Amino acid sequence: MTSHFPQAARALEQWRVAVPSPVTQSAAGTRLNKRGLETRARLLDVAIACLADSGSEPVSANRVAKEAGVTWGTVQHQFGDLDGLWVAVVTEIHARSWVEMPGPWPARSGSLRERVEGAIDSVWTYLDTTEGRALTALRTWLPPRPSDLAAEYPRTAAALAAREHDWIHGFDYLMDGLDLDSAKLYQVRCLLPAAVRGLSNERQLGFTSELDVARRTLAEALVAFLT
């Protein structure tokens, strides 16, 4: 059987092109001058930092405004409401991910084990970044049911779905060209992020002595399942 994802690399490149263009207007529809753009950037930096340091505690827009040294009215002017603020945060995190990976994507090579370990390592590393911790925290205390999330924060729900596509395309790219069962690849793609998040939670709690062993064991188990 040939790869179930023959166009994975091209699809990933197309997804990179879909990263939104820089915002030039406020939520109120006014054009942002240099100062307005700087205020928006500072608010996003502060919001991401607050989320990253919050654990599972909700972060309010008032806290973001206070730590950025502006009023709630400024946050409203820039983002409109909470949905507008959080979708801007998720979009900014999405954009930063691609900025850190410039240039064309190379053809994939390496054994199945090397690729599985690469997928695990990429999730493990990302979850410990400021952006990874912020995204995890935000998703932790937003409504857990997709229907509730879409009802209360429709634009944020759409942006989070786009982040899920990042993972789908990235995993397909990593596994492209291997002669593997597509159904099993799908199962591993669904399992791997949750499994690594569980290990990452242990890291956050300070239980680090055996986590390298746990990651190697996870890789061995997934390779055995796929083969």
Image (spheres, rainbow, N blue to C red):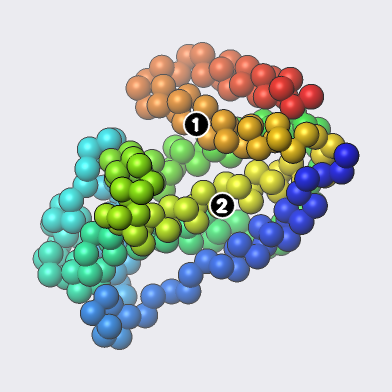
The label number, if any, that marks residue 166 in the structure image? 2
* Above or below 14: residue 54: above
Can residue 86 be seen here?
no
Can residue 159 be seen here?
yes
Residue visible at 18% across and 69% down in the picture: 76
Q: Position of residue 118 (x, y in %)?
A: 66, 36
Assign a secondary structure to mark 2: helix
The label number, if any, that marks residue 194 in the structure image? 1
Q: In which quarter of the image is the C terminus?
A: top right
Residue visible at 27% across and 83% down in the picture: 29
Q: Quadrant of the N terminus?
A: top right
Q: Are marks 2 and 1 in contact (CB under 8 Å)?
A: no
**Classed neighbour count for the residue bearing mark 2: other residues with Cα under 10 Å, few (<14), some (14–19), many (≥20):** some
* Above or below 222: residue 186: below
Q: Residue 218's quadrant in the figure?
A: top right
Q: In this view, does 93 lie to the left or right of 196?
A: left
Q: Is residue 169 left or right of residue 182?
A: left
**Classed neighbour count for the residue bearing mark 1: other residues with Cα under 10 Å, few (<14), some (14–19), many (≥20):** few
Q: Nearer the viewer, residue 164 or 134?
A: 164
Q: Position of residue 12 (x, y in %)?
A: 66, 57
Q: Position of residue 108 (x, y in %)?
A: 78, 46
Q: Nearer the viewer, residue 60 or 227?
A: 227
Assign a secondary structure to mark 1: helix
Spatial separation of the CA atoms under disc 2 and disc 1 = 15 Å
Q: Which amino acid does label 2 sit on?
A: Asp
* Above or below 11: residue 2: above
Q: Where is residue 168 in the image (x, y as percent from the top left)?
A: 60, 47
